[in-house]
Amino acid sequence: MTKEEVAKLVEIVAGRLAESQHGGRWLPTPTRPEPPGDPTPGQLPVWSGAAQGLSDIAPTRRGAGTPKHRPGYPAMVAASRQAAAARGPSPLPSGTLVGADRAVTQRTRREVSIGVSNRHLHVSLKDFESLYGKAKAPSVLRAISQPGQFAASETVTVTGPKGKLEGVRIVGPARGATQLELSPSDCRELGVEAPGVVSGKLERSVGGVTIEGPAGKDALTSGVIVAQRHLHVAPADGKQLGVADGDKVAIECGPAGRRVTLHDVIVRLGPGHATELHLDLDEAFAAGVKTGDLAVIVARTAASAKGKRRPLLTERDVAALAARGEKLSAHGPYLLTPAAVDRAKALGAWRDEA
Ligand SMILES: [Zn+2]
């Protein structure tokens, strides 16, 4: 056989083999994988390549707890997608806000511990007397996290149109007005529709349940609420957490797989508060958290964005103010550029303050 004949034979054999294995084609046609279904509205599709989840290949956690120095990957992924879609702040530490109101929302990352509140009753002295008889006041079973408050030994039975809850704990000491704090599940069980409001704000509260103690019962005409999730902040912690009374914060919590971000968490800062995030049982179950777990403040909306931010005055602003006879100083409700300070001094509109 000549070399040419061998080459021809090889070609024929290869051709037959290819035909038998791939239906006549030497190589299978490459197929492009189909992108998975419709992306979640408002999010870039996963297959776009933007900020893919990496938590499975690059875990950031060692042991339990929230990472201290950088956010968890799911949070970073979500933030990156939002930022890429110009809907949120950049996830970078020095990131500026994109598509969000700069003056209103700031990103923070501060940890607070969680306290889960079961249904409970704050009771007025008058109502307590009708439940437990005169000459008795709520007695301390154990102290709770908020200074001066305690879980009382006394409990009541709450009856609504549809059901009954027994052993509802009284939280003492007695208050000016009776307030029954339920979770949405409790409301369903009792058959009442209580509004979600800030504790103590009873204008929108409802009645329609009866509370009963060993000495008597009381039909409530108001005072039944679902307490809005809130963050108690001790005065000393406000600065460190970067929050003020009345702010709303977004808080991230929960173990991997059940992690949630809770929005509209109202900040209650002042004397008599100990720093703690208060959730009801429904919220805690949904997020998979329990008392003592940590949560992270991830964003803040200031109660009064205006007035808290000091405007930056330039030379031109200073000249205009000086022309109106106003004086400036280093401690005013504004920020001054160095050139503006020089200008103010040159125009005799500077007041030195110790
Ligand atoms: Zn609370």
Image (cartoon, rainbow, N blue to C red):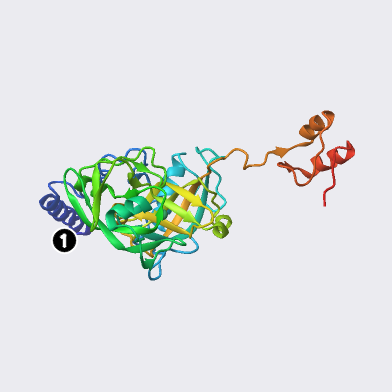
Q: Is residue 166 left or right of residue 291?
A: left
Q: Residue at x 60, y 38 (%)?
A: 306
CA neighbours of label 1 inside 10 A, class few (<14), some (14 to 19), many (20+): few
Residue 304 to residue 67: above or below: above
Q: Residue furthest bottom?
A: 63
Residue 326 to residue 119: above or below: above
Count of numbered badges drawn on the protein: 1
Can residue 315 be seen from the camera position used here?
A: yes
Under mark 1, the amino acid is Met
Q: Is residue 2 left or right of residue 52?
A: left
Q: Image quadrant of residue 129?
A: bottom left
Residue 187 to residue 3: above or below: above
Rendering quadrant holding ligand 1: bottom left
Can residue 50 be seen from the camera position used here?
A: no
Quadrant (top left, top right, bottom left, bottom right) of the N terminus: bottom left
Residue position marked by numbered label 1 in the rendering:
1
Residue 3 location (% of width, % of height): 22, 59
Q: Residue at x 55, y 59 (%)?
A: 237
Relative depth, front residue between 2 and 342: 342
Residue at mark 1: C-beta within 8 A of ligand 1: no
Q: Image quadrant of residue 154?
A: bottom left
Residue 47 location (% of width, % of height): 33, 46
Residue 314 location (% of width, % of height): 75, 37
Q: Residue furthest left?
A: 20
Relative depth, front residue between 340 and 268: 268
Residue 20 location (% of width, % of height): 10, 52
